[in-house]
Amino acid sequence: MPRARVLSGVQPTGALHLGNWLGAIRNWVELQDSHDTFFCVVDLHAITVPHNPAQLADDTRSTAALYLACGIDPTKATVFVQSQVPAHSELCWLLNCVTPLNWLERMIQFKEKAVKQGDQVSVGLLDYPVLMAADILLYDADLVPVGEDQKQHLELARDIAQQRINARFAPKDAEGEPIPVLKVPEPLILKEGARVMSLTDGRSKMSKSDPNEGSRINLLDPPELITKKVKRAKTDPVMGLEFGNPERPETDNLLGLYALLSGKGRDAAASECADMGWGTFKPLLAETLVEALRPIQERYNDFNADPGELDRVLKDGRERANAVAQATLNRTRAALGFLP
């Protein structure tokens, strides 16, 4: 039987951090051995907010290189840049024309980001969930890895495919049964480690958009900076570390990182650190983080030293992605009545 197909991607806005790796890319590495995987750098999404054009190309290449440095194997997975596959933009327009405006106005992330941007909010910010739906639906994805903050976007993609395209425009077979135009994807709920919290607020998710650099560990942070950020991480005055105490969210987050990155697991980590003070634990966590990120940084530097290899990987990925995406786009165009 053919493998189930998985589609996912990360924006090239700012440096990738621990949350991106542990919450997404680390799981992708496992999925590539059991699924047909497509991983894109979603650079079109990066311009829905004000951006620096001079930085975008560099950030796009850096993000792709980090995919590979984290263990994505281009002989197993398709790695590509979203904007280099024109079908993303065209399918987005076709889906725009059948998606009710009120579906987009109720999206939680739009409401939150629009408040921050005020009068500068763009149509793209309102519309990017439709572009995300196009990203997913173009590749006939069976499964889409999602965290809590992306569930609403996947539901929108499912509703657009099912209610606005298949239900209204699906052609009929010889028996009069509808032939779906777009595959309706299912969510793939990520396992432990999918939600990494801020170093400055254990109740908030680690984020590239947080203006405080000390809130996150970036994958390319040098050892001395990692140590500095861990030393300054928010803690509490209680001796000993533990899981599951709602009054100690920072403790839960930092101990969770140690359990995951040391490979010891939650039970062993909790036992080891049950009577440990922060003065002993923080250097231990910093050392664990440095060692966990060292191989990623070394492989990233190898790709930086040989940019031609990254170009080759992205060219191969673009060609494969284009072939799959164009077939879906052609199906959709035909169903909507366009000339071939």
Image (cartoon, rainbow, N blue to C red):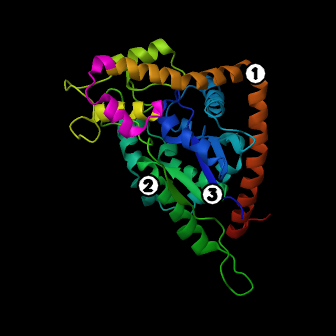
Q: Nearer the viewer, mark 3 or mark 2?
A: 3
User: Could you tell me what secondary structure mostly forms the magenta stretch?
Assistant: helix
Q: Is residue 306 left or right of residue 134?
A: right
Q: Secondary structure at mark 1?
A: loop
Residue 253 seen anywhere in this rendered image of the structure: no
37 up-or-down from 279: above or below: below
Are there few (<14), some (14-19), or many (20+) residues within 10 Å of tag 1? few
Q: Secondary structure at mark 2?
A: helix
Residue to which mark 1 is pinned:
306
Residue 100 sits inside the magenta stretch? no
**The disc labelled 3 sits on which kind of residue?**
Ala
Q: Is residue 235 left or right of residue 257?
A: left
How far from the left and from the top, in percent, is residue 113? Answer: 40, 40
Asked if disc 3 and disc 2 are in contact, CB closer than 8 Å, the reply is: no
Q: Furthest residue to the top?
A: 224
Of the numbered discs 3 and 1, the one sitting upstream in the chain is: 3
Question: Which residue range is magenta in the image?
Answer: 261-280
Residue to which mark 2 is pinned:
152
Residue displayed at 66% across by 33% down:
68
User: In which quadrant is the N terminus drawn?
Assistant: bottom right
Question: What label does residue 141 carry, if any?
Answer: 3
